[in-house]
Amino acid sequence: MSKLTLKAKGALLVLDLKHRTITGVSGRKVPLVGYSAEVGAGSLHKRQTVTRWALVGPFAVIAPKKNQTATLTVTGPGIAKVFEIDGDHVTAAQQFAAQINLFG
């Protein structure tokens, strides 16, 4: 596996492990020298959905749908960027950050 791809809200990040570069929002490949990353806890949103109301009626209030987010912070020479990550991609974001820290 020479490339890792991470889908963030509004961005697609590609980490090229073979060439030790990261490609971000601008599409420009940047060397990983001096870069670091960390994944932070985001927020947890609870909401009732129409489907839950249709299936369980008023009990939907007791079991709302949970949407969790996290943040990926990438810092480097002259840059600090925060990306919002969906809860489904937190593990991928942690692997992504670990690889940046390994090669940065």
Image (tube, rainbow, N blue to C red):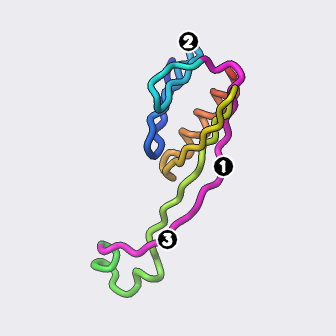
Circle 3 residue: 46
First along the sequence among labels 1 and 3 = 1
Circle 1 residue: 40
Circle 2 residue: 19
Which stretch is magenta? Answer: 31-50
Instruction: Say which amino acid is labelled 1.
Output: Gly
Instruction: Say which amino acid is labelled 2.
Output: His
Q: Check whether the beta carbons of the residues at disc 1 and disc 3 lie within 8 A of each other.
A: no
Left or right of 34: which side holds 82? left
Q: CA distance from mark 2 to mark 1?
A: 27 Å
First along the sequence among labels 2 and 1 = 2
Q: Residue at x 65, y 37 (%)?
A: 80
* Residue 33 placement (x, y as % from top left): 68, 18
Q: Residue at x 56, y 12 (%)?
A: 19
* Residue reaching furthest to the front: 78
Front position in the image: 58 or 11: 11
* Residue reaching furthest to the top: 19
Magenta segment main secondary structure? strand
Left or right of 53: which side holds 12? right
Q: Residue at x 34, y 81 (%)?
A: 56
Q: CA distance from mark 3 to mark 2?
A: 41 Å
* Residue 34 placement (x, y as % from top left): 71, 23
